[in-house]
Amino acid sequence: MTITPDTSIGPRRAVRRIVALFGPLRWWVVATALLSATTFAAGIGLIATAGHLISQSALVDTTATLTLSITAVRFFAVVRAVGRYLERYVGHLGTFRILTRVRVWFFRSIEPLAPAALVDERSGDLLTRMVDDVETLQDLPLRVLAPPVAAVLATAVGVTILGSFDRMLAVVLAGSVVLAGAVLPLVTRRLGRAAADVLTIEQATLSSVTVESVSALADLVAYGREDLLATRLDQLTVRRRVAERRLATVRGLNLALAGSIGAVGVIATLALAIPLVTEGRLDGVLLAVVPLAAIATFEAVAPLAQGFEHLDRSRGAAARLVDLVDRTPTVIDPTAARADELTGAGSIEFDHVGFAYARDRPDVLVDASFVVPAGAQVAIVGPSGTGKSTVASLLLRFWEQQRGTVRIDGIDVRTLPAAMVRSAVAVVAQRDHLFDTTVRDNLLLGDADADDDRIWSVLEAVSLGELIRSLPAGLDERAGENGTRFSGGERQRLMIARALLAESSVLILDESTAHLDPDTEHHVLDGVARWRAGRTTIHIAHHAETLGAPDLVLRVDDGRVVTVETAHHPGD
Amino acid sequence: MLSVACTITWLVLLATVIDGVFLRGEDLAETSTRLAWMVALVVVRGLFVWTGEVLADRASGILRSAIRAGLASHLLAVGPAGLARERTGEIASTLGAGVEALHDYATRFVPAAALVVVAPMMVFAVTAVLDPWTTLVLAFTGPMLVLLLAVIGGRTRALTQRRFDELGWLSAFYLDMVRGLATLKAFGRSSEGADTIEDVSRRFGDTTMEVLRTAFQTSLVMEWAATAATALVAVEVSFRLVAGDLSFGTSLAVLVLVPEFFVPFRRLAVEYHAGQSGRAALDRIDELSALPTMVASPVVGPEIGTGSGLVSPDDGGRGAELVLDAPSIELDHVTYRYPGSTVPALDRLDLRIAPGETLALVGPSGAGKSTIARLLLRFIEPDRGSITVDGRPLEADDVVRWRRSVAWVPQDPAIIAGTIADNIRLGDATASDERVRAAAERALAADFVDQLPDGFDTVLGEQGLRLSGGQRQRLAVARAILRDAPVVVLDEFTAHLDDRTEADLLVAIGRLLSGRTAIVIAHRPTTAAMCDRIVRLDRGRVVGSPPADQP
């Protein structure tokens, strides 16, 4: 329950939703808890019988009478060791499977929302944060759900043993267990919560400040302001340290008190048991069993000290994820999909289209009307932020316009299944992604059936053939995280190649040649024009002149398509 | 360590109390002093534990600050040129989260690791006094345990490491898929994406099972050793008790001490992950620290720090050597090769820029244009050849002083968190509001700034407003105008500008360049055209000066 801004669903309910996802896998968690409890119980048994054994030995003079105790000691020793092993094994495997389930669930759930609902207003790293949240949930089964169950069961064993001697012993043990395992963690959680919240916020600040400082390094050095770097990092540390110091104090207190409560509880049971022995109500042989069993019981309670920390973290993560997943997708597929296929000609029509990204945001497109005939080479130009890229988003049905109609091949896109529209329109967008897999696999996304010959020819079309051939692994070279193996311009060309392979009836290049030097840009645009000959290709750019001679120039300004200039006609 | 001593004493006392009551028939009153001592020990141990935590946190705070400051000043020494190849995100995450990972390492893993060495030895010493025979069991199981762990560890460490790597890989794979979701969707492949995740996880799960089984053998051995030792000691001691070789009190003390022997091992296993991630962070920090320094860059320290923390570019040293008028700049046979590259970025390059001249550099990417800019900013120094300013060698000048006479407009100017005025004042920290405004007006930035709700006090950066590319670039020009330096190095913006913004920007740049010696890395013909002279570069050499050869 750290920071969960404007969550429509409570963090508790969110965790319950996540737990419901476990399905049959929840039995893995139950098994883990039971195994864990068995292990703790065996621990109690081991030390108690061992104490009993020694006490017996002090009284007898032949080892023959000890056989039963010795066997019990051995039995508990084996159960404990095997139990611990099985518990860890089952627990980790179960967690692993549960995490897979959560990952797939989250991926499928956000698929209808992408990318409209996933574009964050502020930080571009929203996705990373969400994935971190998914990973955080792996603590849920092993560190949040299982330990309390195991602790309760193990305590029951300890309490039962002591209770069989005297009821007061059981009460004292149970009382101190509750104190150490429930009351203390609750109190420390309350004491540390404010500081923990500060740290969570600072965690986000930390990464934004360091990213910003490192990207500004050159500017700071050039302007002789190296000192600003140190100053910023210092400020960051100062705020963190206050919260950290508080947390360390609370954590220290928690650890110290948890140990002390346990120890005092043991002393108390012992002090209670002593008069019982003196009065003859408890066999002296069993005296050692009392404190030893109590000590072993507290072992099961120890993991609860950190339990709330994990619970809070899981709750925060679950709330953020569920909140996101519950958003209504901006674009809903028509329930009754039209039977009529697109002709594949690739004509586009915007008919008085009006669009804003949100109700309280200004209109990006006010009243956009234009027609792109099938097979045309088109340039869309205009100042930044005027809705050029929006044209592509509406065509792909990533967003839906509030007014007017968008048609492909004369059919209203709202009446078509989104998948059909997307197979007709390919877009190379500015925020496109290269996967951390091989060059070949990245390209095959455009056309899963493309053979190497076709891949090479598309690479030639974007002037990348020479480069890829020079790589040690050629087509099998990995692109790296976010495609970092390649330069900005090379990444753009790979994305163009991928879109060319899709052979869609409409291709939109959204400033896809921005990072190329003029010579390369010229070659790439040439290659694209040859590859796409006779099919609709739309270039979104700031400058009309880089595009040579398009059939049509659409100038977008102030949300309107103001001018439609026919530059020349094919075959001139 | 002190708290371990408390625990040991406490356990021994516990044994004597039980012994007293069980065999010597003492009652509660007789044992009460010892019970009171036990309570006192609990309190003392609690205090030790508490202060231990607090002290560890302090130490970790000091440690992280020191490491981060050291790393930051090293990065400054490496300079922008040396970092160009590294990824900003990676460096930033090492500097941020990486250093933070040392917190758990310092406060959890290191104490646990230290305890593994010390605590068992203490238990060992006490049992040696109490009962040499049991000590023999420990002397045997202790090294046996270490030995077994070493043997199994040697075999499984590689596997365990691989498992952690693979789990890390799986997370990275998932992140990659989620980031690429929009792309998958655009190609109509998103449902396949979910299947792939499931499939990869399942395939991965099968191998994980295998690895997990082996990895947990370590913990099995540890548990086994701990329980076996307890059981063994219990039986061994009881036999000797029966034989009358040993007193009950000692036997019980020994029995309760034995588990303590293994506690530190288990604690270390719990903190294993903190150790792993801490060590990984240390490796990354080492890697960054090992980056070669490119130039004698000033390190933030006493010589320029002047104690106040903020250094104004104008305070002190506006000495006679500071270049005030537009100088001539000459590059004579300059060669530069980036570390790790086989071909020189600049190859015996000769270039002369007259006082007040504006020179445009054109050519394909990789021709060496940016390298010339970096040399002039002294982010790097030439391998061979010389750069002279008004006939004086550049390297003879102090780096900081030289940079004061250069105004730099980078291709992608950075915005520092702060107000718009703060960002313009990067050019001159002491400039008055009027001068900041005047600079913004000349750079044609004042118009959009005035439209913002807080004007020049609008906060920029991650938490604040984001500017468009064109706006950022005009701010950078305003910054350079405020700098009022005799030399300008300008790397023209390649993309993301519409025609109107570009026209505005050209006017602003024209104002900036007039009367100064300037090098412009031009990407567009229009920009090159407004320069006095154009030089075409290719593969680190001048290949021609197209239209106007002479100014």
Image (cartoon, coloured by chain):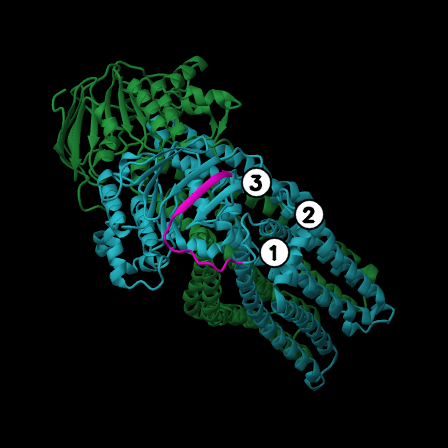
Name the element at disc 1.
Answer: helix
The count of marks equals 3
Q: What label does residue A188 carry, if any? A: 2
Farthest bottom residue?
Answer: A64
Question: As rendered, which of B157 and A411 lies closer to the eye?
Answer: A411
Residue segment shown in magenta: A337-354
Name the residue at 58% across, 72% down: A86
Relative image position of residue B454 (x, y in whole percent): 52, 22
Q: Is residue B68 visible?
A: yes
Q: Is residue B88 shown left or right of residue B359?
A: right
Label 3: how many Cα within 10 Å (few below 14, some 14–19, many 20+): few
The residues bearing labels 3 and 1 have C-alpha atoms spaced at a distance of 37 Å
Q: What label does residue B4 carry, if any? A: 1
Q: Is residue B118 visible?
A: no
Q: Quadrant of residue B231?
A: bottom right
Q: Point out the image quarter for the C terminus of chain B.
A: top left
Relative image position of residue A508 (x, y in whole percent): 36, 46
The residues bearing labels 2 and 1 have C-alpha atoms spaced at a distance of 24 Å
Q: Amino acid at mark 2?
A: Thr
Q: What label does residue A201 carry, if any? A: 3
- For residue A352: magenta? yes
Q: Is residue B370 shown left or right of residue B186?
A: left
**Residue B241 position (above or below residue B105):** below
Relative image position of residue A166 (x, y in whole percent): 84, 68
Q: Which chain is green?
A: B
